Amino acid sequence: CFMRRLPVAVEPVNDSLRTSGFEHSSPPMAFEPPVRTLSTPLGMPARSPSSAMASAEKGVWLAGLMTTVQPAASAGPALRVIIAFGSSSTSGYGTSSPEYSYPNRLAMQLHRQYPGADITVINRGRGGEDAPEMMRRLQNDVIDMKPDLVIWQVGTNAVLRNLDPDETANEVADGISRIQAAGADLVLVDPQYSPKVTEHSESANKMIKLLGKVARLRHVGVFPRFEVMRQWHEKQSLP
């Protein structure tokens, strides 16, 4: 895992939601106190759908993030900018209001968890897109923003549009390489569980497996959204 130290200030970024940072003054200390950090589980998908769901309900794991405490001397680079990259699930289509999109919810949860930190969560979701369109805007919408972490939701529209899962996985692998070359960590979010997606069960299952394989090969995390949502539907009777 990469350990990222949380800062108290960050340059503003347009079209984003930032957690409110507060600087705290304190008397000089002879030693550096522990600092709270975020750890991205590089190469480690959620251990099981049930644990992923339980963690998601706590909020922070929504982005594949875990919290821990590290001595200040061993803390790594600061986590300042998170980009949520994807399609309508990311942009917030279907939510009752914009503040309920998952990037906004993530930003609010991070603020509650780390009130002294200043983290920018940028929403780069665009409805109807999948890997081919996302790759065309990857440079401008993601890499040029110099993110520390990218949460890439991908695969649902590829299934609905009958795109070749192998070609989609190859494009995602190329995108991951470019994001990693820019110095960012990454978490993939696999397709959603919905009636329209499950109508294409063979393609959906192949897409999920291929994205998991790409994630393992590229050493990035995966949030298993399909399986979490399936359990919500089957075990909790959620629509």
Image (spheres, rainbow, N blue to C red):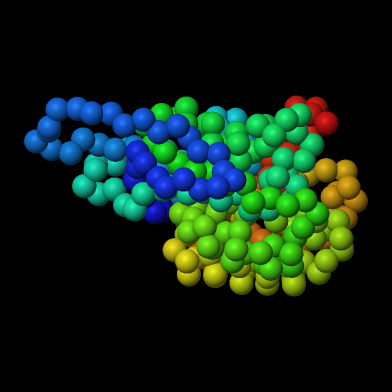
Q: Residue at x 80, y 60 (%)?
A: 158
Q: Residue at x 21, y 47 (%)?
A: 73
Question: Image height check: is 170 above or below 39?
Answer: below
Mark yes or no: residue 223 visible. Answer: no
Pinpoint residue 2: horizontal percent, then vertical percent.
39, 54
Q: Residue at x 60, y 30 (%)?
A: 57
- Which residue occupies the extreme left position in the image? 30
Pinpoint residue 70: horizontal percent, then vertical percent.
29, 41
Q: Residue at x 61, y 59 (%)?
A: 141
Mark yes or no: residue 98 visible. Answer: yes
Question: Image height check: is 230 above or below 175?
Answer: above
Pinpoint residue 14: horizontal percent, then vertical percent.
55, 47
* Number of marks in picture: 0
Viewer-proximal residue among 16 and 53: 16
Viewer-proximal residue among 160 and 182: 182
Pinpoint residue 113: horizontal percent, then vertical percent.
45, 30
Question: Image height check: is 190 above or below 161?
Answer: above
Quadrant in the picture for the C terminus: top right
Q: Is residue 30 left or right of residue 49?
A: left
